[in-house]
Each structure stands twice: as C-alpha cells, then as structure tokens.
Image (spheres, grey):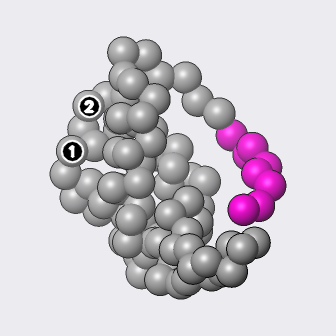
C-alpha cells in the first residue's frame, strides 16, 4: 500500500527466499504494531510488513542466520536487541 525504500541488501546462500523472510518475521514479530487501516477500497487491512526494527538488529539477525545460531533468538523491543 506504500512505496518501498531499500536501505540494505544481503546475500545468503542455501536458503529459500520465502523461508528467510518468514524467519525474519518470526524473529521481529514482537515489534509489529497492532493496527488496522483501510485499503484504497475501504477494506480493513492489518499490515504485516510494518516492522519498526533498527537496521543493526536486522544485520545481527542475518548474521545469526548465516552462522546457524538464530533458532532461539527473538527481538525484544523494550531492550532494542535480540534475546535468546
């Protein structure tokens, strides 16, 4: 529903794109705002892609995916960091 500005890219190998995206969403889900907005037709939408997480946390998550240690981590918005 809005334009996107790419702020960073990363290269990962031997992982499916959708699996990677779902993994990132699981890790930072606690940051997702609980809001509902109307789309251009007036239908209610709950944004799934709005994740106010600092880029350094995303970078850390990507590194943990690369080294295989991400399984037990989630984002804690109060501490503004990944916790395991």
Element on which disc 2 rests: loop
Residue under pointer 2? 68
For residue 6, say whether it is visible.
yes
Q: Which residues are magenta?
A: 1-8
- Residue 16 picture quarter: top left
Q: Is residue 2 magenta?
A: yes
Q: How many marks?
A: 2
Query: Height in image: 68 above or below 22?
Result: above
Q: Nearer the viewer, residue 1 or 5?
A: 1
Do the residues bearing badges 2 and 1 touch, measured as CB atoms within 8 Å? yes
Q: Is residue 17 left or right of residue 52?
A: left
Horizontal placement of 25 versus 10: left or right?
left
- Return the residue at label 1: 71
Based on the picture, tell me whether residue 66 belongs to the magenta stretch: no
- Horizontal and vertical percent for residue 8? 69, 40
Q: Main secondary structure of the magenta part?
A: loop
Q: Is residue 74 left or right of residue 1?
A: left
The label shown at residue 62 is: none
Q: Position of residue 79 (x, y in %)?
A: 41, 76
Vertical position of residue 53 compared to residue 22: above or below: below
């Amino acid at each position: 529903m809005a334009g996107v500005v790419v702020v960073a890219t990363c290269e990962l190998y031997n992982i499916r794109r959708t699996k990677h995206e779902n993994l990132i969403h699981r890790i930072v889900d606690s940051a997702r705002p609980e809001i509902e907005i109307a789309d251009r037709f007036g239908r209610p939408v709950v944004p799934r892609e709005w994740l106010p997480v600092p880029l350094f946390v995303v970078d850390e998550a990507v590194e943990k995916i690369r080294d295989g240690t991400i399984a037990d981590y989630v984002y804690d918005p109060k501490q503004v960091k990944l916790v395991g």
